[in-house]
Each structure stands twice: as C-alpha cells, then as structure tokens.
Amino acid sequence: MSKSKRALPPPPSELDPLIHERLRLGILCTLAVHDLLSFTELRGVLQTTDGNLSVQARRLEEAGLISCIKRFEGRKPKSTYKLTAKGRAALEDYLAVLAEMLPAPVVKSNAALSRLALRPVAAES
C-alpha cells in the first residue's frame, strides 16, 4: 500500500522575475527563433508600442540577455536585436522551471513545450 510521493513542483518564486514579465518573455522567445530582428520587426511581432518595447528591451540588454546593435541607414537610426548565449541559457532555465511546475501529462502532450525549440532560424555568428 505504499505509494511513492511525487516531488512538489517548484514554487512560482523560482521563475526569474526579469524574464517572467509578459513583454520581456515575448522578446526573448521571439529572438530565440529569429537570429536578428530590427526594432520595427520586433515591435510588429509583439504588437506593442515603441516606448514599451524600448524600456523592456533595455532591461534585457542591461542584464546581458540580449544585445542591441545600433547603426544608421542613410540618416535614420536602426537598432537590431539578438539573443545572447546568456539570454538563451536563461530562457531555457526559465522554461525548464515552468515545465516542472506543470503536470507531467500536460508537458508530455504539448509537443511545442516538450521540444523547447529554441534554435535560431539562421545560424549564429
């Protein structure tokens, strides 16, 4: 009659608060599957405002999770964002903790989560 006790899932406090914010998580996930994206492309994918994207991207950049390359095309500034190795590792850790919080059947039945397809579309340089 002895049942093995299942380990308790990690508490929500184990989720990285920097990554857990909706827009920052969106930025990291989007950059995980796209090698490079311009500010305009990222804003379009995430459907957010310039100001909100700028503030949240800066927080991720200051933490070393993304890098921003600024240059001019003609007279117009152009910012391009890329996920750093530190950012990819932090996102993978975040997703692993999140997966531990979910019941095993949910994780196993969700093909996208079980694969954790975080490889960039184009090769990293």
Image: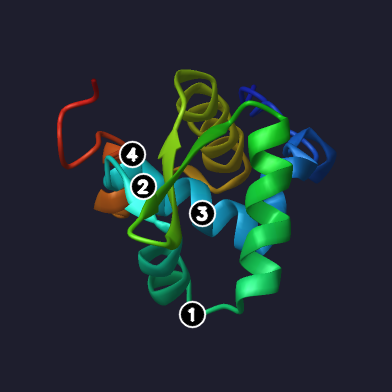
Task: Name the image quarter holding residue 53.
Answer: bottom right
Q: CA distance from mark 3 to mark 1?
A: 11 Å
Q: Is residue 96 above or below residue 85?
A: below
Q: Is residue 122 left or right of residue 65?
A: left
Residue matched to label 4 = 116
The label on residue 47 is 1
**Residue 105: horizontal and vertical position, in percent?**
40, 49
Q: From the image, which quarter does the N terminus lie in?
A: top right
Foreground mark, 3 or 4? 3
Element carrying mark 4: loop
* Residue lying furthest front: 75
Residue matched to label 3 = 27
Residue 1 visible, this angle: no
Q: Residue at x 52, y 40 (%)?
A: 99
Q: Residues within 10 Å of mark 1 (few under 14, many from 20)?
A: few
The label on residue 90 is none
Foreground mark, 1 or 2? 1
**Residue 26: horizontal and vertical position, in percent?**
52, 58
Q: Residues within 10 Å of mark 4 (few under 14, many from 20)?
A: few
Q: Nearer the viewer, residue 20 or 109?
A: 20
Q: CA distance from mark 2 to mark 4?
A: 5 Å
Q: CA distance from mark 2 to mark 3?
A: 17 Å
**Residue 16: horizontal and vertical position, in percent?**
73, 37
Q: Are marks 2 and 4 in contact (CB under 8 Å)?
A: yes
Q: Is residue 110 left or right of residue 65?
A: left
Element carrying mark 1: loop
The label on residue 113 is 2
